[in-house]
Amino acid sequence: MKIDPKSTDDLSVQIAEAIKDAIMSGALIVDERLPSEAELADHFAVSRPTVREALKRLAAQALIRTQRGAAGGAFVNRLSFEDAHAQQITTSTLLLSMNAVSFDTACEARFALERACAPLSALRRTPDHLAAMRAEILRQSQPGLTDETFCASDVAFHRALVDGADNPVLSYHLAGAVEAMQPLMNMITFTARDRARIIALHQGIADAIEGGDGDAANRILTELEDETRKLARDVFAARMPAQAV
Amino acid sequence: MKIDPKSTDDLSVQIAEAIKDAIMSGALIVDERLPSEAELADHFAVSRPTVREALKRLAAQALIRTQRGAAGGAFVNRLSFEDAHAQQITTSTLLLSMNAVSFDTACEARFALERACAPLSALRRTPDHLAAMRAEILRQSQPGLTDETFCASDVAFHRALVDGADNPVLSYHLAGAVEAMQPLMNMITFTARDRARIIALHQGIADAIEGGDGDAANRILTELEDETRKLARDVFAARMPAQAV
DNA sequence: AGACTTTTAAATGTCTGACAAATAATTTCT
DNA sequence: AGAAATTATTTGTCAGACATTTAAAAGTCT
C-alpha cells in the first residue's frame, strides 16, 4: 500500500485510493482493523490530519467505520444493502436534478426497469407483498390526500412490487431509479380524476401480480407509464406556456 | 444551515449533512461557491480541521469540488454521469463481494435489467452501436484470449447493447449491474465450446437488435442467462465438491 | 495606451503539538 | 472473587503556523 510521490493529487486522495484499492482487491477483508491513524501517518509519511481526511473520505462512502477508545480504530465495513441504497438514492436524485434529464427520459428508464421486475414478482411475491400493495392502494384512495403523500404512497406501492421479485440486487438497483424520480413526480398536480385512473391501474397491477400473470402486469405498467408521461406533459405545458415548442 | 448540539454524531458528520441537505434542497445551486473554510469554521463554531473533514466527506461523494488559489474554494459540483457511474460501480461491486450474494441472484438481476433495455435498443440503436457489438463479437472469436479479456469484451458487448437504448439514465443504472458482476464472471473458466455458444448467442442478439426485434433479443438474452448460470453452476460444483448440497 | 512582469492577497493543502473523550484492559481494593 | 479505580490506547477536536497555488492588482517598459 504505497502512494506515488509524482502524483498531482492531494495526499489525502492518494491515501484514500490506496486503502480503497486494498479493500476492493481483498487485501483488507471485512471487519479487519486498519492501523491506527498515527501508524498510517508514519507509513505514508504524512501528518495525522492528512490521514484523517483520507479516512473521512472512505467513511463517507461507507467503506470503513471508526470506533473510539482503546480497542477502537478504523475497520473495513461490510457494505450493507441499506448503506448502498442510501448512497444510490443520493447519487441518482442529484444526477436527475442537476443534469437537465427530461421527465420522459427518467420516466422511461424507471418503467423499463420496473417491467424487468414484474414477471419475477408475479412468480414469487408473498402474501405480505400483495398486502403491502393493497394497503397502498387503499391509502391512495383516501380523499384529501396531499400530492406529496399520494406520491409517497405511489413509491411505496412500486417498492412492494419490486421487492416481490425477491431479489435484493434487483431491489437495490430499482430503488435508485424509483425514488430518484420522486422530486420530479412531486412537481405534478394530481386531480381527483388522475388519481382515480392511477389507482385503477395499480389495482390492475396488483391483480395481475396476484394471478401470477407477469405479462398482464407489464401491459398495465406500460399504460401507467403513458398516463404518467401525459400528466407530466400537461403540467409542464401549463406551467411554462411561453416555452412551449 | 445549523447543526444540532445534542446530536451524538461527530461534528464533521453533522456539518457534512447540513451542507448536503442544502445542496439537495436547492439552497445551494450548482457551481455556487461555499464560504471559505475559515468562514465555515466560524459559522459552525468549530475548528478548520473539522470543517475540512466535513468537506472531504462531501468531496468523496462528488458533491463538491475544491480549487486552490485566490478565487478558489469549495464549489457545488454538477454530478456527472461519469462520476455517478464510478461511484455506482464501486458500491455495487463491494455489495456483491461482501454480502454473499449468490451468483444466481446477481445474474438474474443483471439479465432482467438488460431485458428492460433490449426492446428500446432494438428501436433506437444507431449503426455505431451495432458496429460496437459486432466488433466485440469479432474480438471474442479470436483464439487464445484469456478468460479475463473474454469477460471484458463480454461486458463491452452488453454495454453497447444497453447504450443503444439511448437513455442515459438507463445506461447509468445498468452499468452498475453489469460491471459489478465482472469479478464474479472472472471466476468462471470458459472452454472453447462455451465461448462458441456464447458468441453464437451474441450474434443472435446483434441480429435481433439490427432487425428491430426486441422480443427476439429478449428470448436470446434469456437463453444466455440460462447458459451463464449453467456454466457458473458447473464451475462452483467442480471447485468445491465438498460443499455440494 | 497597451502589453508584459512583479507583487500581493486569498484560499486550500499540510504540518506540529496539544488536549478531550471514549473505551477496553489492567490493577487495586474490599 | 468481584467490584471499583486506574491506566493506556485510540479517535475527535482545537489552535496556530507555514507551504503552495492562483487570480487579481500594481507596477514597468515600450
Image (tube, coloured by chain):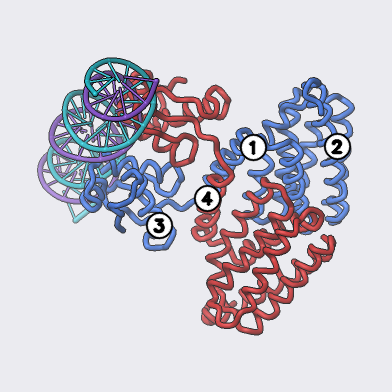
Chain colours: A red, B blue, C cyan, D purple
Which label number is shown at residue B21? 3
Marks 2 & 1 on one chain = yes
Label 2: element kind: helix
Classify 10 Å Cα crowding around label 3: few (below 14), some (14-19), many (20 and above). Answer: some
Which label number is shown at residue B81? none
| Earlier sequence position, callout 1 versus callout 3 | 3
Position of residue A93 in the picture relative to residue C20 (left or right) = right
Position of residue B181 in the picture relative to residue C15 (left or right) = right
Q: Is residue B162 visible?
A: yes
Q: What amino acid type should be assigned to the residue bearing mark 1? A: Leu
Label 1: element kind: helix
Q: Nearer the viewer, residue C27 or B237?
A: C27
Q: Nearer the viewer, residue B8 or D3?
A: D3
Q: What amino acid type should be assigned to the residue bearing mark 2? A: Glu
Label 3: element kind: helix
Q: What amino acid type should be assigned to the residue bearing mark 4? A: Ala
Q: How much space separates mark 2 and mark 1, taking CA atoms?
A: 21 Å
Work out which quarter of the rendered image holds the C terminus of chain B and state it: top right
Q: How much space separates mark 2 and mark 4, taking CA atoms?
A: 34 Å
Q: Tell me what residue is drawn at x 58 percent, y 59 percent.
A: A179
Tag 1 residue: B96
| Earlier sequence position, callout 2 versus callout 1 | 1
Tag 2 residue: B227
Which label number is shown at residue A86? 4
Front of the two marks 2 and 4: 4
